[in-house]
Image (cartoon, rainbow, N blue to C red):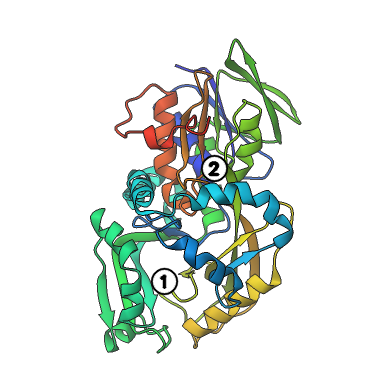
Amino acid sequence: MPEHVIIAGAGIVGVATGIWLRRMSDARVTIIDRLPPGEGTSHGNAGVLAACSIAPVTAPGLIAKAPRMVMNPDFPLFMKWGYFPKLLPWLLKYLSHANDADTRRIAQGLTPIVSDSVDQHLSLVSETDAAEWVVQSDYSFAYADRAAFEADHYTWGLRRDAGFEPVLRTGAEIRDYEPSLSPRIGLLASMQDHGFVRDPGGYVKALAQAFERLGGTLLQAEIKDFELTDGKITSVLTDAGAQPCDRAILATGVWSGPLMKKLGLKIPIETERGYHIVFEDAEGGPSHPVMVASGKFVATPMAAGLRCAGVVEFGGLEAGPSETALALLRKQTRLAFPNLRHGAEIPWHGHRPAPSDSLPLIGQVRQSGIYTAFGHHHIGLTGGPKTGRIVASLVADHPVNTDLGAYDPMRFS
């Protein structure tokens, strides 16, 4: 049993891991992050507990479609072209998985991490103040018409194979069920037994407080390196000094890539830049999360207002936000919810961690005592509690009833 475990990263994965470790063991647990809990990527997402999100972006046919997507100003895919030469090696690996065999393999790998998301979040928040942020609900996909829905038949087939069957509504049924939607929406496919979080950043902060009440420690510092002796972790080196430990967990999203290089591993991971806008004090928006297929964005009712999140942009970690991307998100929101009224707008952009094979890295690096828990792409909030539970079990020497082969952090070595 470890004596002191350091978790790098105070997002949903890191904080969930910390809570489960304190529940499972008597080990001292310290979470270290350069930002306060819940202020990185975990703050800026659609907030959906998207249990059915098992299909990767790299579906068959993506390679043929991608050039048209990038060149279409109304499609939510953007490229900062000055970054393209640096992106290209990762992009070639990423697109190599856009085939049926790899897509089905990836979907099978994602299913155990996300398919029981609501139950995992409810278990995580049990007997904590964070429970107030979790809402059980439907999750709907809005299409212009049946033809547009059937054009997504491949993805829906993967979902059905995993046990997810939508309830379909058309015409007046849509308006009765979700009157906020535009008449442009001709078919709604709704998944039951899903949910959402009313404020992802506030949720992670509440979980961090629960972690501290369980005896955990939070430290705000930037992690620089690891110190190993005979191949085993002995301390984490930070700008606040060395922090001795006998286990470490890496849950710093896309920023885990440079730290893995310190361990001699080059992970093909990129930032997939994402955006959201919170329309404060919104009225006339949806009552539950809705994915608007034409705009590839999700609208979720939250404590502060309506959050609309989407857009894929490649441009690295350093560039600032794109006003063009935010303008498109506003336009698509107006088209989908024509009666939306709101106060101020709060825009945000951040960095989704995208491994080239769309699968997270979960497991121990060699026999170093360093464990990985990052690379969740679009499913970080959804899969965070399950990942945290798995990694905590590995560290605490508890049984793990999940085949972890698909997530092996050594698979790129």
* 371 and 12: which is toward the camera: 371
Q: Residues within 10 Å of mark 1 (few under 14, many from 20)?
A: many
Residue type marked 2: Ala
Q: Which residue is at a point 34% across and 64% down the rendered structure image?
A: 137
Q: Residue furthest front?
A: 64
Q: Residue at x 52, y 56 (%)?
A: 200
**Which residue is located at x 42 percent, y 60 percent?**
196
| Amino acid identity at mark 1 | Val
Judge from the rendering whether residue 394 lies leftward or rightward of residue 86; answer left or right: left
Q: How many marks?
A: 2
Tell me the quarter of the picture where residue 133 sits.
bottom left
Where is mark 2, residue-wise? 208
In the picture, measured across the screen, residue 60 lies left or right of residue 193, that is right
- Which label was assigned to residue 398? none
**What residue is disc 1 on?**
290
Q: Mark 1: which secondary structure?
A: strand
First in residue order: circle 1 vs circle 2: 2
Residue 218 % position (x, y) = 61, 35
The answer to whether residue 34 is visible is yes
